[in-house]
Image: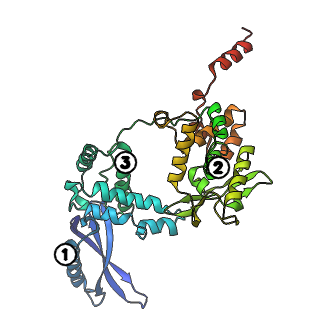
């Protein structure tokens, strides 16, 4: 092995049958410790215990290790690409040992980032793991940006390279980290736009020929459901009599039905508008069993509507209330904005923060704070009148 000096120590290993065999520990100069143990196969026998034979065997073993291919001699890109596979040791380890399985979507996207944006870089072609340097990574970032890759995608690719490398470090198969001083590409985080109370009211009054479209919008704006939770909603999760939705599922195309984000479900109240929309969808749905999807896909019983269905219907309904696509984009309004609107409107209406946190399924108050955008919907005249009244102006 290229990182080993010709230093080793012999020691006697007692076997289960009572005999002893010479074993050897090899010094790793990179790790500054004896890190690999091997049996020489030489029995401890006789007056001199065959130590000289054991030393010769240890030298021969060292020579074999030095010429044998090592983990770090494999191509860097090939290693990263194989790392992000459903049957890779890392993915299995996360699922089987730590009970924290990675989503199939995340694994697929990481593999795709390596294949589409890292593998084509000429300097990485046939580059061995042990030859990767920090400067090469920085050069790749510049190259990727010159090819039109955005900062968020560049950072995702960095993560898809960094995690495999640190996995090797955790296994002590490599001892340096060329990613240590690599800073992520800078990008401006644009604040998520939300709908004003008046716009939410207009959205509730807006009509759409497909009742599933209105229901998707209502579930986001009036119940705070994420898009995957809307898609994963089953009829068994809906209690129309008790006016409660039990958020128990999240649907992702690559993974199918999963637990909601953060691994915890929650209950949310059904407002009157949502109740009416649910009944309208139920009356028009060909699939009404407990395990059927509420927002069903046409012609596919066990698949909900797609992400594009929700996005296009949202755009159509926003246009219907006077928010054309250009304005929607400039305000950064997406389906997730409806969830931001739900949290903000809840706080503006005086609902206790702890209650809102529970309804939204946030793990912390800090996360809930991120989703609140009261400044975007403040009525300045009403605020001024309240302040003036408080100080008897």
Q: Quadrant of residue 351?
A: top right
**How far across and how far down the image is residue 138, in percent?**
26, 46
Compared across the picture, whether 324 is left or right of 386 comes to left
Give the residue at mark 2. Answer: 215
> Which callout, 2 or 1, points at the residue further toward the start of the chain?
1
Give the residue at mark 1. Answer: 63
Q: Is residue 194 above or below residue 75?
A: above
Give the residue at mark 3. Answer: 153
Looking at the picture, tell me which residue is in the foreground, 40 or 146. Answer: 146
> Which callout, 1 or 3, points at the residue further toward the start of the chain?
1
**How far across and how far down the image is residue 62, in percent?**
22, 74
Which residue is depicted at the point 62% across and 40% down? 365
Do labels 3 and 2 touch, CB within 8 Å?
Answer: no
Which residue is depicted at the point 24% across and 52% down? 133
Give the farthest residue toward the top: 393
Q: Is residue 223 above or below residue 255?
A: above
Compared across the picture, whether 36 is left or right of 365 comes to left
- Distance from label 1 to label 3 (Cα)? 44 Å
Kindly state the secondary structure of the residue where label 1 is placed. Answer: helix
Q: Quadrant of residue 221?
A: top right
- Badge 2 crowding class, 10 Å Cα cut-off, few under 14, some 14 to 19, many 20 or more, is many
Q: Is residue 381 above or below residue 125?
A: above
Please identify, in this view, whether the residue under mark 1 or under mark 3 is nearer the observer.
3
- The answer to whether residue 204 is seen in the rendering is yes
Compared across the picture, whether 223 is left or right of 226 comes to right
Kindly state the secondary structure of the residue where label 3 is placed. Answer: helix
Compared across the picture, whether 366 is left or right of 144 comes to right
Kindly state the secondary structure of the residue where label 2 is placed. Answer: helix
> Which callout, 3 or 2, points at the residue further toward the start of the chain?
3
């Amino acid at each position: 092995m290229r990182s080993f000096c010709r230093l080793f120590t012999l020691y006697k290993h007692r076997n289960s049958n009572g005999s002893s065999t010479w074993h050897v520990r090899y010094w790793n100069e990179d790790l500054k410790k004896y890190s690999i143990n091997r049996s020489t196969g030489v029995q401890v026998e006789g007056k001199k215990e065959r130590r000289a034979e054991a030393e010769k065997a240890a030298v021969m073993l060292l020579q074999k290790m030095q010429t044998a291919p090592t983990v770090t001699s494999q191509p860097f890109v090939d290693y990263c690409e194989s790392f992000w596979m459903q049957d890779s040791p890392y993915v299995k380890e996360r699922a089987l040992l730590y009970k924290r399985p990675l989503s199939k979507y995340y694994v697929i996207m990481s593999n795709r980032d390596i294949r589409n944006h890292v593998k084509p870089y000429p300097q990485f072609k046939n580059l061995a793991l042990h030859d990767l340097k920090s400067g090469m990574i920085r050069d790749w970032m510049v190259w990727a940006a010159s090819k039109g890759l955005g900062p968020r995608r560049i950072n995702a690719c960095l993560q898809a390279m960094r995690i495999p490398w640190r996995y090797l470090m955790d296994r002590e198969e490599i001892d340096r980290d060329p990613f240590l001083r690599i800073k992520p590409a800078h990008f401006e985080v644009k604040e998520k736009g939300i709908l004003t109370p008046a716009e939410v009211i207009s959205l509730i009054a807006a009509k759409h020929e497909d009742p599933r479209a209105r229901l998707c919008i209502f579930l986001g704006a009036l119940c705070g459901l994420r898009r995957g939770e809307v898609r994963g909603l089953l009829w068994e999760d809906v209690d129309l009599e008790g006016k409660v939705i039990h958020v128990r599922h999240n649907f992702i195309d690559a993974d199918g039905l999963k637990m909601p984000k953060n691994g915890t479900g929650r209950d949310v109240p059904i407002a009157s508008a949502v109740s009416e929309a649910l009944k309208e969808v139920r009356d028009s749905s060909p699939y009404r069993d407990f395990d059927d999807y509420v927002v069903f896909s046409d012609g596919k019983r066990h698949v909900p509507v797609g992400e594009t269905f929700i996005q296009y219907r949202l755009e159509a309904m926003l246009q219907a209330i006077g928010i054309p696509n250009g304005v929607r984009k400039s305000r950064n309004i997406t389906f997730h904005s409806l969830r931001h609107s739900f949290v903000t409107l809840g706080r503006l209406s005086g609902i206790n923060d702890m209650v809102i946190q529970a309804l939204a399924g946030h793990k912390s108050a800090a996360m809930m704070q991120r989703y609140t955008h009261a400044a975007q919907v403040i009525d300045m005249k009403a605020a001024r009148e309240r302040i003036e009244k408080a100080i008897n102006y």
